Amino acid sequence: MTFGTKTTHAEGEAEGGQIVRGHVKWFDAARGFGFVVSPEVERDILLHVNVLRNFGQGSIGDGSGVTLRVQRSERGLQAVEVLEVEEPSTEIDLPEGAPVPDYLQPIDESLPYLPARVKWFDKAKGFGFANVFGRSEDVFIHIEVLRRFGLADLGPGEAVCLRAVDGARGKLALEVRRWEHYVE
């Protein structure tokens, strides 16, 4: 198994639209769209949730680096394909001396990726739960864990892969990735 970014076309290939690198200005999964900015183009690029889902993600964190195939329409630039999402930095930015929450502990790379399905996630509350396939216990997911790995939100029933540990009150996700990380 290989874990990393997914690239489907050679860089610079122009067939079907211009290839642009940029970063997510903002993305709202509930509204179904967001915008990407790039120094390579003069306008913001519309990123629709269906284009992102075709890449295997239902959300993307603000500031995430992306490579897109874009086309011009009468309404402006629009992403027609996500080619790559850059791996975000997993550095933890906490005030000096602040305790590190359990869910932001360093990740033991020997922990296996577990296939899971989101039970529910409430972005406003900042947390939710998933169930690992074949197990009945819930796994707690904090929004900061999603942000740490380039995700902004999760939908009920969404398939993900995660690394979890036993926390003080049950299973706790330390890493949450799009499903394709598990199957690649």
Image (spheres, rainbow, N blue to C red):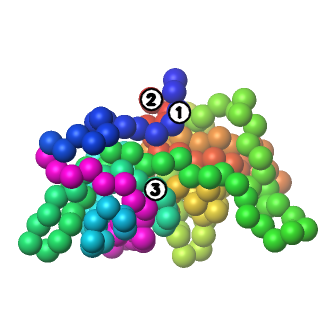
Q: Residue at x 28, y 36 (%)?
A: 9
Depth order, front residue of 153/60: 60
Classed neighbour count for the residue bearing mark 1: other residues with Cα under 10 Å, few (<14), some (14–19), many (≥20): few
Q: Residue at x 50, y 52 (%)?
A: 118
**Left or right: 89 as drawn, with respect to 11:** right
Q: Residue at x 52, y 23 (%)?
A: 1
Q: Residue tagged by mark 3?
A: 65
| Helix, strand or loop for disc 3 | strand
Depth order, front residue of 88/57: 88
- Give the amino acid at mark 2: Glu
Q: Residue at x 43, y 62 (%)?
A: 23
Dot placed on the residue nearer the N-terminal end, 3 or 2: 3
**Left or right: 67 as drawn, with respect to 43:** right
Q: Height in image: 132 above or below 43?
A: above
- Give the amino acid at mark 1: Phe
Q: Is residue 2 magenta?
A: no
Question: Is residue 32 visible to the viewer in this orientation of the structure?
Answer: no
Q: Quadrant of residue 26?
A: bottom left
Question: Is residue 45 visible to the viewer in this orientation of the structure?
Answer: yes
Label 1 with label 2: CB-CB less than 8 Å: yes
Q: Residue tagged by mark 1?
A: 3
- Give the amino acid at mark 3: Gly
**Left or right: 171 as drawn, with respect to 82:** right
Image quarter hosting the C terminus: top left
- Residue 184 has which mark? 2
| Helix, strand or loop for disc 1 | loop
User: Residue placed farthest to the top in the image?
Assistant: 1
Please report the bounds of the magenta region as a residue range: 16-36
Q: CA distance from mark 1 to mark 2?
A: 7 Å
Q: CA distance from mark 3 to mark 2?
A: 20 Å
